[in-house]
Amino acid sequence: MESWATFGGDLHLDLSSGRARGLGLRAALEDALRSAVRDGRLSAGTRLPSSRALAADLGIARNTVAEAYTQLTAEGWLTSRQGSGTVVAEREPQSRPAAPPPLPPRPAEPRHNLMPGSPDLSHFPRGAWLAAARRAFATAPHAAFGYGDPRGRIELRRALADYLARVRGVRTDPERLLICSGYTQGLGLVCAAMHRRGLRTVAVEEYGLPPQQAVIAAAGPSTVALALDDHGARTEQLLRTDAGLAVLTPAHQFPSGVPLRAARRAAAIAWARATDGVVLEDDYDGEFRYDRQAVGALQSLDPERVVYAGTASKSLAPGLRLGWLALPTALVEPVLEQKRLADGQSGSLDQLTLAELITSGDYDRHIRRSRLRYRRRRDQLVAALARVAPEVTVTGINAGLHAVLRLPAGAPDEEELLRQARWLGISLNTLSWCRAAAAGPDPDAPSALVIGFGTPPDHAWPAALDALCTLVRP
């Protein structure tokens, strides 16, 4: 195998194939060039390197290349003009192997995206992010562009330790923080690390995100479901399970939106201490509180029994792929080992930028602006539904970027609602989709929709809200 550089890029030529068939060096080069043209790797009009350049790259005599060019020009594969060099000639279309069957067409994008789980991406702080990136890159050490600490850049871990303590009451330090590619990876790392240490069962909430339950299963453990009510997960049920890890959304249960009451927080910590268990706190939208004081992190009650998991997916954008884990001391090395095996480290450049965004205060300013914007949308949603569908109960709206719409008795079932939503061009979730497999079906559950009011951009929000009102109007 030999390679050479063209004027526009690299091209791989296989001379060994011809040599293996007993061809001389010149004949093998001719054969490789014919194959490249025939297969389309060298398209018509592509300029080839000079005979001198190609000979130097292949380590063969210049005359060998010149003679190969002359022969292929005579055969019509190449053309050569004074001052223009040697280029691939235009050729009649040749029969080629049958192309693979086309992939099925992708479904059309819905007109109104009300799926929960994403912020309004049109309000990503591009200017502040770009300014932070410039400042961060200007002062970054050279080592920041190489392989580094699997825990992540120390600049971001220091910034996060201060920010989380100030805003969420998290008690940690940079040495116990690990940067990961979002909450999903963080969950997988913790489950895999604990599974290697004997974890067999993970307790999850009765309703949550099925993809995250799939991540737990992929790491090895099975799941058991904790019942939910208006006060959050029934954490007293943990003592009746063999779970070693409990995954909770205590500040804003997904999807119901209720916070975990104080007694149940205490019960979760008591269970962890009594059984040598661990709680994983998913604080997926902890910054967005509207009608009440922010609920502090459960982790503050016992940093050695709670893994705090946060993410920039809701506060900034999912595409950044930035999340973090505040780990108990005993889990730092086991989870770090899983991070090494998974991808070695998360991207340094975005970490440096986020660290600068936080320390400059621009992150706080963006959060405050976003909180006001989403609160206005929440209020518009509630007012519109009260006007056109007063029988619909809207819950989980004191915080976060989504709401649960519980429909009255006699309303269409969720499958019919999904069909009608597709007809109206709306994408959304149903409450039953969020039900944990370990909990089993609930035939008595009312029809309910889970909609994300943060997802549409500003210009699309009024039309999306009108379409939703049409869907749920009696």
Image: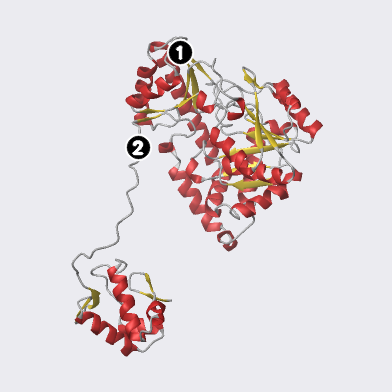
Residue at 42%, 15% (x, y): give it.
412
The quadrant where residue 161 appears: top right
Residue at 76%, 38% (x, y): give it.
304
Q: Is residue 154 visible?
A: no
- What residue would you read off at disc 2? 107
Q: Which mark is on residue 331? A: none
Contact check, label 2 and label 1, Cβ < 8 Å: no
**In the image, is residue 456 above or below residue 182?**
above
- Mark 2 surroundings: few (<14), some (14-19) or many (≥20) residues within 10 A: few
Determine the residue located farthest toward the front in the rendered image: 21
* Residue 72, horizontal then vertical, whole percent: 24, 80
Pick the residue in front: 6 or 227: 227
Quadrant in the picture for the C terminus: top left
**In the image, is residue 229 above or below residue 106?**
above
- Residue type, numbered disc 1: Val
**In the image, is residue 35 above or below residue 256?**
below
* Residue 323, horizontal then vertical, whole percent: 58, 43
Q: Is residue 231 visible?
A: yes
**In the image, is residue 21 above or below residue 460?**
below
Q: Which mark is on residue 392? A: 1
First along the sequence among labels 2 and 1: 2
